[in-house]
Image: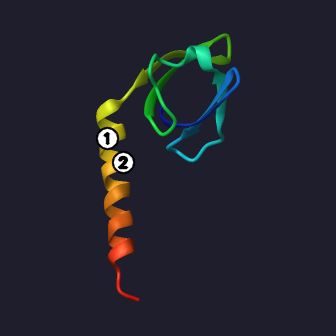
Amino acid sequence: MRVVLESINDELATLIPDDGSGAIVIGKRRLPEFVQVGDVLEVTFRLEESTQSIELIEQLVGETEKRKARIKSKREKLKNRKN
């Protein structure tokens, strides 16, 4: 599941899934090194005895850059739009 790192506060991090499901709050120690708010991550879950837990969190640098470029382009278009 792809998520965006929404915030890091004290010892917790909030992840927002692309699929629109509810926010995921995890301990910030579970995050990969050097991630920043706004980064796109891939979260892999595992199912154990009907309980879902996070198995792996990977940083998707290319996807993060692609999304930032798309947002920048949209901002520029809005900024340059004639009223």
Q: Is residue 12 above or below residue 15?
A: above
Quadrant, the C terminus? bottom left
Q: Residue at x 33, y 76 (%)?
A: 80
Crowding at dot 2, Cα within 10 Å, few <14 / some 14-19 / many 20+, comes out as some
In the rendered structure, which amino acid carries the disc numbered 2? Lys
Callout 2–callout 1 Cβ contact below 8 Å: yes
* Disc 1 target residue: 65
Where on the picture, by quarter, is residue 75?
Answer: bottom left
Q: Nearer the viewer, residue 60 or 1?
A: 60
Is the residue marked by circle 1 packed among few (<14), some (14-19), or many (20+) residues within 10 Å?
Answer: few
Q: Name the residue at the bottom extreme.
A: 83
Q: Which residue is pictured at 65% across the width and 38% down the height?
A: 23
| Point 31% across, 41% down: residue | 65
The local secondary structure at tag 1 comes to helix
| Amino acid type, mark 1 | Glu
Image mark for residue 68: 2
